[in-house]
Amino acid sequence: MLESYKIKSYCHIEDSQLLLNGQVLYADQSKAFTEFIKAAYKSENTKYSKFFKMDSLSKLAFLAADVLLKNQNYTDEEQDIAIVFSNNSSSLNTDRKHQSTIEDKSNYFPSPAVFVYTLPNICIGEISIKYKLNSENSFFIFDRFNANHLKTYSDILLSKNKAKEVLCGWVDFEDEKDYKAFLYLVSSEGDLDNNEQEINKLYNI
């Protein structure tokens, strides 16, 4: 039987609000995503030079992860944290941007800076670079948030000592108004139950 693991901390970014453990850190609902995420990044005094070159999905995932990990007082020294993310649209928003640069043969201008983000797990790479994470990582595509799958997968990683903690969650970007990040940190220590019902409650907070 697997050990019962706990949720240490969780973060939401949705509707132009950034929340940590249910508390609003930054909000400006007058801003669409592009301006909001830049302002939220600056409000957190985050330092990562590549942030402004990222696609929207990576900015969303990176900021939520950074807020969580900073809250645990982790630094950019190597950490033993696995990452297990999921979403519905993969990297579709960036895929469409890339497609628009190649569909007209008479005006063919593919950008390597766009193309590099045409995989959803690139956001995991950005987080891993910042926090020197060399543990297991996966990115799953589901129709909807699947708390049970993430719980089972993270429990297995922890029970088999593949990592000391797992950064789990949902990070999906459709467009400027339709996006959501819900990330949470699972370990042997924490205050919140890591079960499907509790995770779903946190997801919908």
Image: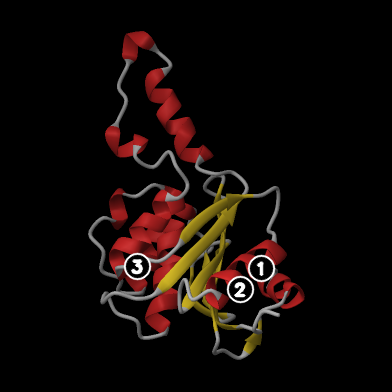
- The image shows residue 63, relative to residue 106, as above or below, that is below
What percent of the width, then of the height, locates residue 29?
54, 63
- The image shows residue 143, relative to residue 155, as above or below, that is above
What percent of the width, then of the height, locates residue 149?
68, 62
| Mark 2 closeness class: few <14, some 14–19, many ≥20 residues within 10 Å | many
Q: Which one is earlier in the sequence, the residue at label 2 or at label 3?
A: 3
- The image shows residue 12, relative to residue 97, as above or below, that is below
The residue located at (35%, 63%) in the rendering is: 128
Colouring style = secondary structure
Query: Can residue 36 be seen in this snapshot?
Result: no
At mark 3, the secondary structure is loop
Please state which amino acid type lies under the numbered disc 2.
Answer: Asp
Q: Which residue is label 1 attached to? A: 152
Could you say which disc has been placed on residue 155 in the image?
A: 2
What percent of the width, then of the height, locates residue 180?
57, 58
Please state which amino acid type lies under the numbered disc 1.
Answer: Thr
**Separation (CA) of disc 2 from disc 3:** 18 Å
Q: Which one is earlier in the sequence, the residue at label 3 or at label 1?
A: 3
The residue located at (38%, 75%) in the rendering is: 80
**Marks 1 & 2, CB-CB < 8 Å contact:** yes
